[in-house]
Amino acid sequence: MTPLPVLSDIAHLLQRNDRVMALDLGTKTIGIAISDAERRWASGLRTLVKGKFSVNADEILKIAAHYQVAVIVLGLPLNMDGSSGPRVQATRAFAKNLGSLTDIAIVFEDERLTTVAADDLLAAAHISGKKRAAIIDTAAAQVILQQALDRLAR
């Protein structure tokens, strides 16, 4: 199986001040995070309600254009043993479909345990209940993006 591209694979293509966006494709929502222009920090941006692909893709690409995003990082929901399941296939299909609508590079980041890390962050910030459920995918996107940025910095 061919390895999937990750952010560090295309680092040489990034220009100064290019931003990176991350998406966490949840079952009901899509979490979005964005990097700063220096690509040091990830910030949770917003949560989209998952709906018709064309509507979600349009919103994602509008956000990408607004922030001058050069790369989109998609969280890849591998099984704990590293194998691929139906959610990985759905994520790859999403990437392929989104990629057909834009010239923005799309790469992947292993998202195993990112929701757990995001949940811990939200708990530490004393965010609970319905509020936490509403933003968990955005917090997970932030964790995914920060992992990718940290690897890129090394």
Image (cartoon, rainbow, N blue to C red):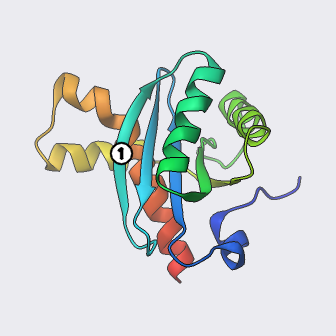
Taking the view exactly as shown, the residue that stands out farthest to the front is 66
| Residue under numbered circle 1 | 45
Taking the view exactly as shown, the residue that stands out farthest to the top is 52
The answer to whether residue 94 is above or below residue 130 is: below
What residue is shown at x 89% (from left), y 52% (from top)? 1
Residue closer to the observer: 56 or 79: 56
What residue is shown at x 70% (from left), y 79% (from top)? 12
Residue 120 drawn at (x, y percent): 26, 47
Taking the view exactly as shown, the residue that stands out farthest to the right is 1
What residue is shown at x 44% (from left), y 70% (from top)? 37
Q: Is residue 45 left or right of residue 64?
A: left
Residue 14 drawn at (x, y percent): 64, 73
Q: Quadrant of residue 137?
A: top left
What residue is shown at x 54% (from left), y 73% (from top)? 151
The answer to whether residue 90 is above or below residue 116 is: above
Residue 116 drawn at (x, y percent): 37, 44
Q: Is residue 108 visible?
A: yes
Q: Residues within 10 Å of mark 1 (few under 14, many from 20)?
A: some
Residue 39 drawn at (x, y percent): 46, 71
Q: Label 1 sits on what residue type? A: Leu
